[in-house]
Amino acid sequence: MFKKLLIANRGEIAVRIIRACREAGLHTVTVYSTADKHSLHAQIADESVCIGPAPSKDSYLNMQAVIEAARLTGADAIHPGFGFLSENAEFAQLAEDNGIAFIGPSPRAIRLIGDKANAKKTMKNAGVPVVPGSDGELTDTFEAKRLAEQIGYPVMIKASAGGGGRGIRRVDRPEDLEHAMELCKSEAKSCFGNDGIYMEKFIIDPKHIEFQILADSAGNVVHLGERDCSMQRYNQKVIEETPSPVMTPALRERMGRAAVAAAHACGYTNAGTVEFLLDKDKNFYFMEMNTRIQVEHPITEEVTGVDLVKEQIRIAAGEKLPFTQSDIQMRGHAIECRINAEDPERDFRPSPGTITALHTPGGLGVRVDTAAFQGYTIPPFYDSMIGKLIVHAPTRKEAIARMTWALSEFIVEGVDTNVDFQLSLIRDKAFIDGSYTIAYLTRLLEERKQKR
């Protein structure tokens, strides 16, 4: 086992990893920007190192600064959390070259899966169902038009190196295809430094279902069930739950086998998430694979009792999984609401500033993952998420009731938040009956705009 672990991240995920390390008896090191000097993750770690000014590119995305902090403090492992450098193959390789364990998959696996077009080809060869579309990247407009006619409109143009809902364009008519390709390539180049794009058939009103997997270096792979991430605002997840309200045991078995096959196909190790689209006829298609811990990992922990961060660390240290697929049991129902410092009434504009008062809910089956505290100043340079509210209960109906009163007790003053907005979604009929799809919330918000 490692002796000292550096956390190359900030906010609630850094705090979450620190707590897992303490339970595992590991010494922790955090890095922080000048904007995060007084942040919780910088205060509670055993050691903290400033790695640069506020902008991410000069601090949390500065690979050399992070590696130097690890070398300076004698850290023998790095956990990247999510976002920032977590899916950067060059960073994983740099850590490896410096004799520092990277808590995640190999650089090779990250490269393979990070290129969405090549990942799709790999999955297709492994027998995992994929969305009809291009085999690899699009390089020719004429060929793209021919393919779109073949698979039928609407189609989606996506960035090969994309993620987080960026670099995606829906095309409904042939005359719009070329312009959409140009826009997608431009956004992909700006956001990811790679203008490669590919095409997929647009699946109308699907569910977004992802499977959590764990894989060790001995070739053992298990899945820990699904998460329904269909409540999205313009491709950004808002609420996640497990189990999915539309899942059946037979469908879970099929999708779970496909998720495990996906991991085997790319020689995957550590924690990962295989994401699928599920259509109205219960046909599912591989969408992408995330090579990191997910924001919504706590709901899987709640229903399975498995500490995913601890398992990540153990796997990276060379230990085998302590359980098999038959040991994994899903108990009860869990829901997560992302709490953001933003103003839903002003098109979800970020709301940085100082939290003057804070009360978080508690009690049986209620968990709050956050790095916020009274007096904390939310900087304007990073993601607006300040915490996650997670509930667990024996049934979905009880989990919804528990989340309803928990949100009602969540008080944040000094900045705007989406707490009331989340409360309205939990009470929404489409959420209560489980019929919501990826497009539901976006349509709802567009309708509200038109009524103003």
Image (spheres, grey):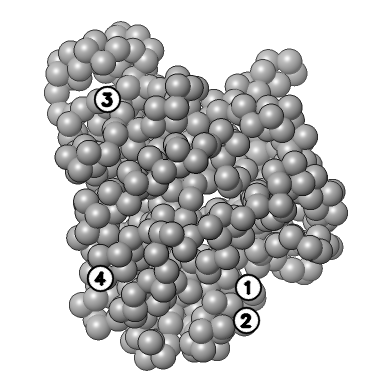
Q: Secondary structure at mark 1?
A: loop
Mark 2 near mark 4, Cβ–Cβ under 8 Å?
Answer: no
Q: Is residue 69 left or right of residue 89?
A: right
Type of the residue with mark 2: Gln
Residue receiving disc 4 = 218
Residue 75, given in percent of the width and then of the height, sits at 38, 86
> Residue 421 location in percent, x, y?
74, 39
Residue occupying the point 39% across, 27% down:
283
Q: Which residue is mark 3?
A: 132
Q: Say left or right for 272 vs 134.
A: right
Specify the amino acid type for callout 4: Ala
**Residue position marked by numbered label 1 in the rendering:** 39
- In the picture of the structure, the residue carrying the numbered disc 2 is 43
- The Cα–Cα distance between marks 2 and 4, rounded to whole angstroms, is 37 Å
Amino acid of disc 1: Ser
Residue at image coords 49%, 41%:
249
Q: Spatial distance from mark 1 to mark 3, Cα to Cα?
A: 46 Å
Compare marks 1 and 3 and give the one earlier in the sequence: 1
Query: Mark 3 falls on what kind of element?
Result: loop
N-terminal label among 3 and 2:
2
Q: Is residue 7 above or below residue 208?
A: below
Give the distance between the C-alpha atoms of the residues marked 1 and 2, in whole angstroms.
Answer: 6 Å
Judged from the image, the secondary structure of the residue bearing numbered disc 2 is helix
33 over 286 or under it: above or below: below
What residue is at 41 percent from the left and 59 percent from the top? Answer: 325
